[in-house]
């Protein structure tokens, strides 16, 4: 299996993890009356696609801010499609949707940033240990 394909699969599964967790929290705390198989599958697929969209951060040509904006707009668009497919969005709750999306995006952004920082710290610690052994 090629490295690029494995990277896409890894990003997809990470996205599914974040999306499934977010969806389950909404089910638990936001009073969803019923959840259908279609709802669950759409959440998993869209979440996976948002995960794949994180590959935009691997582009070397653009600044981080442009990549972040592209990811944000892409994720927003994909979530809009999911909300439309599941009939979860109406004009009455448009503002709540936008505020919720931005809040959730920021929370996940900071969680990912903390995970990356932790991974970098762990790798640097291992490198330091190897360097001290020499």
Image (tube, grey):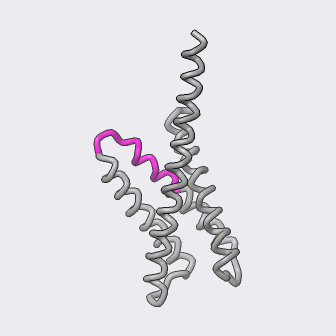
Q: In this view, does 125 lie above or below 79?
A: above
Q: In which quarter of the image is the C terminus?
A: top right
Give me the residue at 66% from left, 70% from top. Answer: 25
Q: Is residue 5 above or below residue 68?
A: above
Where is residue 92 drawn, in percent x and y? Answer: 47, 90
Quarter-of-image position of residue 71: bottom left
Of the pair 20 and 103, the residue shown nearer to us: 103
Q: Is residue 61 left or right of residue 21?
A: left
Q: Where is residue 121 in the image (x, y as percent from the top left)?
A: 54, 35
In the image, residue 58 lies in the stretch drawn in magenta: yes
Identify the residue shown where x is 59% and y is 62%: 19
Q: Which residue lies furthest to the bottom in this view?
A: 92
Depicted 108 relative to depicted 122: above or below: below
Q: What stretch is highlighted in magenta?
A: 49-62
Q: Is the magenta stretch mostly helix, strand or loop?
A: helix
Location of residue 87 by image quarter:
bottom right
**Residue at x-position 64% and y-position 62%:** 20
- Asked if the magenta segment contains residue 24, the reply would be no
Q: Residue at x 40, y 48 (%)?
A: 56
Q: Residue furthest front?
A: 132
Relative side of 44 to 108, left or right: right
Q: Where is residue 22 in the image (x, y as percent from the top left)?
A: 61, 66
**Can you tell which quarter of the image residue 46 is in?**
bottom right
Q: Is residue 46 above or below residue 35?
A: above
Question: Is 31 left or right of 131, judged from the image as shown?
Answer: right
């Amino acid at each position: 299996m090629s490295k690029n394909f494995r990277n896409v699969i890894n990003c997809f599964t990470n996205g599914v993890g974040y999306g499934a967790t977010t969806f389950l929290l909404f089910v638990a705390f936001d009073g969803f009356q019923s959840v259908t198989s279609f709802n669950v599958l759409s959440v998993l697929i869209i979440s996976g696609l948002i995960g794949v969209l994180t590959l935009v951060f691997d582009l070397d040509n653009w600044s981080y801010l442009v990549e972040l904006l592209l990811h944000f707009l892409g994720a927003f668009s994909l979530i809009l499609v999911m909300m439309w497919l599941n009939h979860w969005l109406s004009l009455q709750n448009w503002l709540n949707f936008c505020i919720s999306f931005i809040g959730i995006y920021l929370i996940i952004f900071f969680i990912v940033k903390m995970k990356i920082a932790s991974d970098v710290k762990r790798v640097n610690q291992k490198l330091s240990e190897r360097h001290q052994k020499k």
